[in-house]
Image: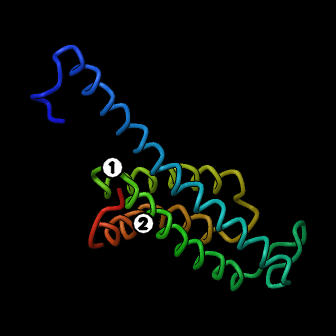
């Protein structure tokens, strides 16, 4: 079926659903990356607490070395979530990854303000400062992949 063979009364219905579907796919791509980052980071935190790598919840703050470990895996997970967002994006994968990174930046700054005394300042500032570079790296990696995921 081509546009030429469709009756004129059906044509507006076909063309009006495409932008709406694309918007929903864009929102879904960003949401999927956000949920993936949140879920994997939270699960890793809980596993490290349960395994005794991190102190029990509610205990005094961790050492800087343990915060460095947390920062390292958050960096990797942020890149992975941005990669997922870019691969699921209906078009302009880098833009979608950077939207996710911008959301991460805003939430990281809010978290740094709210939890300023919970750990070293470099950690809070580093998580916030790495949000956009991680998003760019994930988007760049996805855009260099062979085919978009559709």
How many other residues sit within 10 Å of disc 2, few (<14), some (14-19) or many (≥20)? many
Which residue is at a point 82% across and 76% down the rendered structure image? 49
| Residue 103 appears left or right of 10 | right
Q: Position of residue 90 (x, y in %)?
A: 33, 49
Mark nearest the camera among 2 and 1 is: 1
Q: Determine whether the residue tagged by mark 2 lies in a helix, strand or loop.
A: helix
Can you tell which quarter of the image residue 3 is in? top left
| Residue 57 appears left or right of 31 | right
Q: Nearer the viewer, residue 76 or 67?
A: 76
Residue sitting at the far top: 9
Residue sitting at the far left: 4
How many other residues sit within 10 Å of disc 1, few (<14), some (14-19) or many (≥20)? many
Which residue is at a point 71% across and 65% down the rendered structure image? 42
Q: Which residue is mark 2?
A: 83
Q: Determine whether the residue tagged by mark 1 lies in a helix, strand or loop.
A: loop
Picture disc at residue 1 = none
Quadrant for the C terminus in the image? bottom left
Q: Who comes first in sequence, dot 2 or dot 1? A: 2
Q: Nearer the viewer, residue 115 or 141?
A: 141
Residue 46, placed above or below residue 19:
below
| Residue 53 appears left or right of 114 | right
Can you tell which quarter of the image residue 41 is in? bottom right
Q: Which residue is mark 1?
A: 90
Which residue is at a point 60% across and 77% down the rendered structure image? 73
Can you tell which quarter of the image residue 38 is in? bottom right
Q: Position of residue 2 (x, y in %)?
A: 15, 35
Q: CA distance from mark 2 to mark 1?
A: 13 Å
Check the image and tell me how it is coloured: rainbow
């Amino acid at each position: 079926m081509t546009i030429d063979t469709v009756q004129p009364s059906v044509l507006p219905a076909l063309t009006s659903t495409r932008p709406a579907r694309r918007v929903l796919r864009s929102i879904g791509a960003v949401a999927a990356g956000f949920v993936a980052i949140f879920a994997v980071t939270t699960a890793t935190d809980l596993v490290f607490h349960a395994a005794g790598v991190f102190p029990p919840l509610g205990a005094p703050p961790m050492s800087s070395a343990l915060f460095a470990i947390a920062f390292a895996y958050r960096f990797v997970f942020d890149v992975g979530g941005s990669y997922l967002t870019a691969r699921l994006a209906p078009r302009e994968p880098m833009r979608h990854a950077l939207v996710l990174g911008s959301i991460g930046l805003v939430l990281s700054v809010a978290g740094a303000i709210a939890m300023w005394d919970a750990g070293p300042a470099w950690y809070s500032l580093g998580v916030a400062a790495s949000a956009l570079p991680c998003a760019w790296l994930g988007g760049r990696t996805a855009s260099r992949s062979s085919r978009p995921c559709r």
